[in-house]
Each structure stands twice: as structure tokens, then as C-alpha cells.
Amino acid sequence: MHARTLITLAALWLGACLPEPQNVDFGACEEPPPGEVPATTPTYHRDVRPLLERECVNCHQDGGIGPLSLDGYAEAAMWSEVSLAAVERGDMPPWPPSSCCRELRHTRRLDPDDVEVLRSWIDAGTPIGDEADAPAPPAAPGLSRVDLEVMMPAPYTPTASLGPSDDLRCFLIDWPLDQVTYVTGIDVVPGQRELLHHAVIYSIPDAQAANYQALADADPKPGWSCPGGAPQSADAYVGGWVPGARAQDYPEGLGREVLPGSKLLLSAHYELSAGAAPDQSVLRFKLEDEVTTKVEGLAVFDPLWVTTRDMMIPAGEADVRHSYSYDPSAWFKLGQPIQVHDVALHMHEWGTKATLGIIRSTGEVECLLHIEHWDFDWQGEYFLEQPVELRLGDKLYVDCHFDNSAGNQPDGQQPRDLWWGDDMEMCIGSLLISS
Ligand code: HEC
């Protein structure tokens, strides 16, 4: 038999043994069991207020990004039924990752018992109770310590550049420290809480900063328009921020190196439905001089998607899928395993669902992050509860679905062919790893 035929046959045979990652359904998970009905009638001060303060009030307060306030008895009672309905539908709190994929840190999800507390409180006529019964308020969210604060160089007033109410804008900010430093936590204080919908922070080494500076210089307003949202080199990734996140300290011992002379690149997503106003957001960092585990960014996508029109999403098609698997062995120092600490997926507004996973050398497929209902407005990065080990021979894969039919045009235009090359769409998995 011809050698090539043998290889083809072997590949076919091997292929038949491997589960197709595309066909593993990570979205189908079991419903959690129903919660326990509380033994005593819940009251606002004792039961409901702590729950709302823990899970909702971060976003739902005056000037917050949520459309209504849940901060105070009158507000909580007035919105109680719509709140319960939003929670039961799984819409609130917003948390896109599938619960059957991996345990993630800082998960925003109500326990079934919490849902029963809300329901019983409404059934009992939303009693206010006695303020003296209220438990101590929770610790304020945010960093445990702030070592450095930097600000956008100038106020910027967003204007819709992507569809009717979104603007994606990038800014360069000087990194003021003159020794190697490790970022161990990030927080963002929006200049305009109602406008800033999410932010991603990159560190750009001195040698590349001029390319970005040229983009900023060519634009008369502060920063420059960056509809893709991100520079293509994911190894520059420092961290992301979404409003309402509980705490942004990295897990103990982990840090992201930033070199002296670097610039920070802030990629900001503004959502303009509440009206535009000048924003000058502040970035806060927790820092260390040394860390036990240095994390680096790693991206999973097909390089051809960027350089050609290979990632074509034809006009009018309702379910277009692109996937790619990648052998990360270049990251293995002397064949030693690497650890995955943090995962994220990124698509634009035509994305509908996506998975980042591992194909083990044995052929087994494991989920790292699955988003069943992609929502461009709720992107996040997610620290894994437990790091996951990648061994020599394992592959990473990313799988994205897009809907380019007439009914799913975020900008209300007619469907047209889309691809990555010009930053119209993207499909990228990113990870923070250590070796
Ligand atoms: C991370 C921010 C955030 C958190 C946390 C959050 N919300 Fe929301 N909420 C929003 C935003 C933004 C909207 C507007 C719709 C959208 O963008 O999804 C919204 C919409 C709503 C609405 C009106 C729309 C609807 O779905 O009926 C209700 C009611 C609501 N939230 C209740 C809650 C409750 C109850 C909690 C806590 C259990 C909560 N939210 C937690 C941001 C948040």
C-alpha cells in the first residue's frame, strides 16, 4: 500500500476515534434542584436587602448601569415582581458562562434558596421588618488595596461608531513605574457609570507603543476608534473589567508582569442609550514587586482568519460556525505542563454562542468556557476556581457561531458578508497561563 494512503487511513481511523469538539454540547446541563421555602416569612431588612446588596445594587442604584434602582425599601418593593421574573428567566444577575462547563470565581448567580426568599417575600406582601435585624453590610467590592491610579489622558465624549448606540475607543496611558512590576488586581472607576460598559487593559511594550501613538495622533479626538476592541497580540492582555464585578484581586500568588517604559492600552466599550457625556475613567491597580506565579496571555484563533477572508460569514446565513484547534506546545518549557488560570471569549455583535476547550491527547474533550447565549454587552474574563493543567499533546480549541440573517443585524443594515480581516467580526479565545 502506498505510504500516503496509509497515512490517510490512519488519520481517518484516528479521526473516527476522536469526539468532534464541535459536536459536544456544553450548553445542555441539568437544572439545579429547586430551593427551600424559608421557614419564617422573609423581611426586607433581615433577608431581602442583604441579598439585593450582594447581588444587584452594585448596578441597580442611582447613576448605575441598571435601568432601575433597587437601593432602598420603596424601590425594592416597587420592582419586586419584575425583579423576581428577571431572576427566574435567568436574565439577572447578568452572567453569561454556562454553569455546566467549569467552576469560576466570582460567579454571579442567585442560589435557588435566594429565589425562594424573594418569592416568599412577595407572597407575604413585601414586609419591611425591623432595621435592627439587618446583618452587617457586606464588604465594599473592589480591590483589597490600591497601589497605583492612572487616568485617561483627557476627557472623551463618546459618539456612536458601531451601530446606533455603541462606541469602541482605545486610549494610550503612560505606565509611570520605572521597575518591573506585577499587576495583581485591576479595578476601573468609570468617569461616567452609565456609559462605560466594559474595559480591557493591555500593556504595550516600549518598542510597539509608537504604532498605537500614531493611531491616536491621527485622530483629532482623544484616543482612536477601535471597533475590533483589541490589539491582535493577546500576549499584551493584562485584564478586563465589567461593571458590577465583585472584586478584581487576582487569585493569591498570581501576577502579570509590566515592564518599565510600557504604555497601557485601555480598550473601552461605551453604551450610549443614556446619552453621551465626557468620560475620564480611572484605572486602579494592586501591585507587587515579586509574585510566585507569573501569568502570560495566550490567544487561540486561526492566524488565517486575520490575514485572509477565511472566516467568512456570508450575508443572510443564520448559523455560521468557525472553529480552530491549536497546539500550544511552543509554550511548554522543556515539555513541562502549563497551567490555565483565566479564560475569556471574544466575538462581536453577530456572535451567538461560543466555546473554548481542550482536546486531550487521548481525544477526550473538556470545556474551559462555554457561552450559550452570546451577548456582546456582557463580555468578561473569568478566573477558574481551580487551574487546569495542559500537557504535551493536548490542544486548545475555539468554536464560534454567528447569525448573519436579516433579523439579526445590530446596526439595522441589510446583511452583508462579514469576516475578521477588517475587524467586522472576531472569534478568539484568550487565556492567562503560567508555565
Ligand atoms: C452587573 C450589573 C447588574 C447586576 C449585578 C444586576 N443587574 Fe439587573 N440589569 C442590569 C442592566 C444593564 C439591565 C438592562 C438590561 C440589560 O442590559 O440586560 C438590567 C435590567 C434589569 C431589570 C429590568 C429588565 C428585565 O429583565 O426585566 C430588572 C428587573 C433587573 N435588572 C433586576 C435585577 C436583579 C433583581 C438583580 C440581582 C439579583 C440584578 N438585576 C443584577 C445590570 C445588572
Image: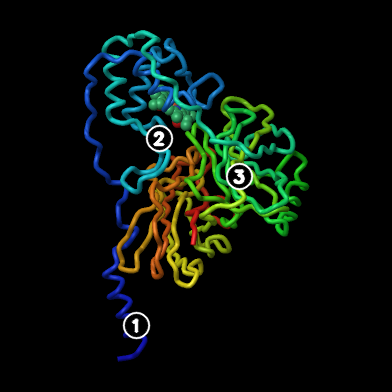
Q: Which residue is mark 1?
A: 7
> 9 left or right of 304?
left
Which percent across, then down, holds residue 267? 62, 44
Picture layout, residue 207 above or below residue 173: below
Inter-mark Cα distance, 1 to 2: 49 Å
Along the line of sight, the residue nearer the viewer: 24 or 178 = 178
In this view, the mark in front (3 or 2):
3
The one nearer the camera, 114 or 214, is 114
> How many numbered circles does the render carry?
3
Measured Cα–Cα span from mark 3 to mark 2? 26 Å
Of tags 3 and 1, which is closer to the observer? 3
Question: In the rendered structure, which disc, 3 or 1, sits on the residue that comes first in sequence?
Answer: 1
Q: Is residue 25 left or right of residue 424?
A: left
Cα–Cα span, label 3 and label 1: 52 Å
Identify the residue shown where x is 37% and y is 22%: 83
Mark 3 neighbour density, 10 Å: few (under 14) some (14–19) many (20 or more):
many
Q: Earlier in the sequence, mark 3 or mark 2?
A: 2
Residue drawn 48% across and 38% down?
A: 378
Q: Quadrant of the N terminus?
A: bottom left
User: Is the CB–ligand 1 distance for label 2 below 8 Å?
Assistant: yes
Q: Are marks 3 and 1 in contact (CB under 8 Å)?
A: no
Residue 287 — which label? 3
Could you tell me the amino acid type at mark 2?
A: Arg
Q: Is residue 213 above or below residue 106?
A: below
State which mark lies toward you, 1 or 2. Answer: 2
| Residue 118 place in picture, x, y as percent | 31, 20
In the image, farthest residue toward the bottom? 1
**In the image, what residue type sits under mark 1?**
Ile
